[in-house]
Amino acid sequence: MENAVVMRNVTKRYRGFCLDNVSLEIPKGYITGIIGRNGAGKTTLINSILGITCFEGEIEIFGKPLCGNEIEIKNKIGAALGNGFFYEGLTLRQTAGMLKRFYADWSDDDFFEYMRRFGLDTNKKVKELSTGMREKFAIAAALSHNAELIIMDEPSSGLDPVARGELTDIFADVIGDGEKTVVISTHITSDLDRTADFIVMIDGGRVVFNMQKDELTDSHRIVKGPADALKSELKRQLISCRTGAHGFEGLIRTSARIPGLVYEKPTIEDIMRAYAKKGTEAESNV
């Protein structure tokens, strides 16, 4: 499988936080979701890929080292980071006119089509846009220059369910030819349940897992049962567990079944919360 992004031993240190020796492959032609709690390192990872922040280690994009090839590589990347950083006094049409100067393959046709799909008036000024409209505009700009790698940081946080559904359809169209890659960092994991092919979880600046989404959800199960069924052997297998008056509920990575217990397929959010809780408990025991 060809990779769009390869990270080797990437480290970025801040006061009180470290993106810690991350090695990661993001396959070409798919949608990869990056998940994790706030402060886990998702944005630092994305900023490293984009060359926004300095880092130790190596990053290759499209098979070429990022360092030394930034102009060529960045011309092929579309990025939407929050609601964008656009000049407030310009209209959307004027802003597009400025952006097109930076990209060799900018398409006015694509831009105005995304404006239509998102219901945006190109004669409006940036300062007149709501948070959700700003996010739509940033996404449209990122998708309008035939980028081979599209990177979105919390792209749907300010969007209503209808707009989020539209964005899901757009991402599916983008990767349809197998030549483009989408990377989405988000805390709205329900969107990834529908769209993602691969899931990467970051916690405490480290990669917890990088798996195909279906493999991830198929290999884990929520298990429930009475308190007296929570034996020591089962406890050791649970990634996380909570107990109450009516019994226990936890996440387990196994295909085995114990009679008398209830097993359910988890969502991505279920899995993320369990591993994040495990990480918190491990930190508290240090």
Image (cartoon, rainbow, N blue to C red):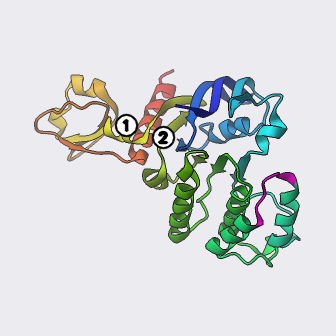
Q: Which residue is mark 2?
A: 198
- Magenta-highlighted stretch: main secondary structure? loop
Is residue 188 rendered to the left or right of residue 79?
left
Is residue 12 rendered to the left or right of residue 267?
right
Reply yes or no: does residue 256 show up in magenta: no
Does any portion of residue 52 appear in the rendered image?
Answer: no
Is residue 271 rendered to the left or right of residue 151?
left
Q: Position of residue 119 (x, y in %)?
A: 65, 76
Amino acid type indicated by mark 2? Phe
Q: Position of residue 23 (x, y in %)?
A: 60, 24
Does any portion of residue 30 appear in the rendered image?
Answer: yes
Inter-mark Cα distance, 1 to 2: 9 Å
Reply yes or no: does residue 107 show up in magenta: yes
Q: Position of residue 271 (x, y in %)?
A: 40, 41
- The total of numbered circles placed on residues is 2
Q: Residues within 10 Å of mark 1 (few under 14, many from 20)?
A: few
Question: Which residue is pictured at 66% across the width and 48% down the height?
Answer: 150
Q: Which mark is residue 106?
A: none
Q: Secondary structure at mark 1?
A: helix
Question: Which residue is pictured at 58% across the width and 48% down the height?
Answer: 184
Q: Secondary structure at mark 2?
A: strand
Q: Which residue is at the front of the view, 185 or 203? A: 185
Q: Magenta span covers which residues?
A: 102-108
- Please tell me whether residue 188 is drawn above or below residue 227 in the rendered image: below
Q: Position of residue 62 (x, y in %)?
A: 68, 34
Amino acid type indicated by mark 1? Glu
Q: Which residue is mark 1?
A: 215
Q: Which residue is at the front of the view, 285 or 145? A: 145
User: First in sequence: mark 1 or mark 2?
Assistant: 2
